[in-house]
Image (spheres, rainbow, N blue to C red):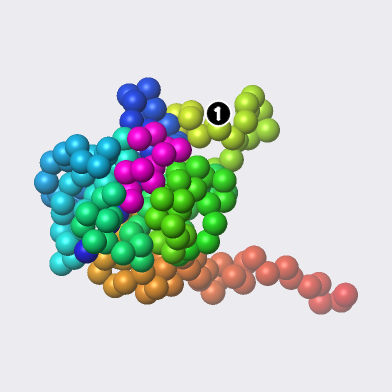
Amino acid sequence: MLLVVGLGNPDPQYADNRHNVGFMVVDELASMCGAEPFRRKFSGELARVFLGKTEALLLKPMTYMNASGECVQPCAAFFKVAPAEIVVVHDEIDLPFGDTRLKFGGGHAGNNGIRSVIARLGTPDFARLRVGVGRPGPGFKGDVADWVLQGFSGEERTSLPNYLRSAAETVLDVAARGFQTAMNARNTKPKKKQDEVASDTPRTPKNS
């Protein structure tokens, strides 16, 4: 069994924020795979679903981002889900909008939701799906915390449905093929076609 956790904040004013993209991906996954309705459990919203042939739990902590572990740990303990069978989906400012990366273990990189999950599980050894939201541009007034609590731009909102679907498909890939295989496939950028590579290669003048 997989436990797929989307991180976010529960109040309506946060619903469309960059910080809530974890919730958005889990909702997309629930819609794509016909999950049963979410129910309040473990200070969160929980639904059962089959991701292909793999039984899974979808969890959205309602504890606010900084206390996400207070929801994740009791749920994992009750269903006897090992940390290595947990996938946490969260926003990542160090990736541009449109990019996702699978990662296993490591630190929290300043994400307080991940920090809380590590603290409550007592280990960093769980999978993360990092969903890029980018960093603020030079004209943005405020700090990173202000940035992730902003909504997506108009241009980003246009492509957001496809982005969320792609992220959800990455979780499906983990369920179908295992984490390592999915990571190797999903984290590799498509190679350029030969003619594109040739056009990018600086040409040396014949007489130089």
Q: Which residue reaches farthest right?
A: 208
The residue sitting at 19% across, 37% down in the picture is 40
- In this view, 194 is above or below 112: below
Q: Which residues make up the magenta segment?
A: 63-73
Where, quadrant-wise, is the C terminus in this rendering? bottom right
- In this view, 127 is above or below 93: below
Q: Nearer the viewer, residue 143 or 152?
A: 143
In the picture, measured across the screen, residue 74 lies left or right of residue 160, that is left
Residue 152 pos. (x, y %): 45, 32
| Count of marks placed on residues | 1
The residue sitting at 33% across, 59% down in the picture is 86
What amino acid type is highlighted by mark number 1? Asp
The residue sitting at 21% across, 44% down in the picture is 46
Residue highlighted by disc 1: 146
In the picture, measured across the screen, residue 152 lies left or right of residue 83, that is right
Residue 96 located within the stretch drawn in magenta: no
Where, quadrant-wise, is the N terminus in this rendering? bottom left
Find numbered disc 1 in the image and state the secondary structure of the residue it sits on.
helix
Q: Residues within 10 Å of mark 1 (few under 14, many from 20)?
A: few
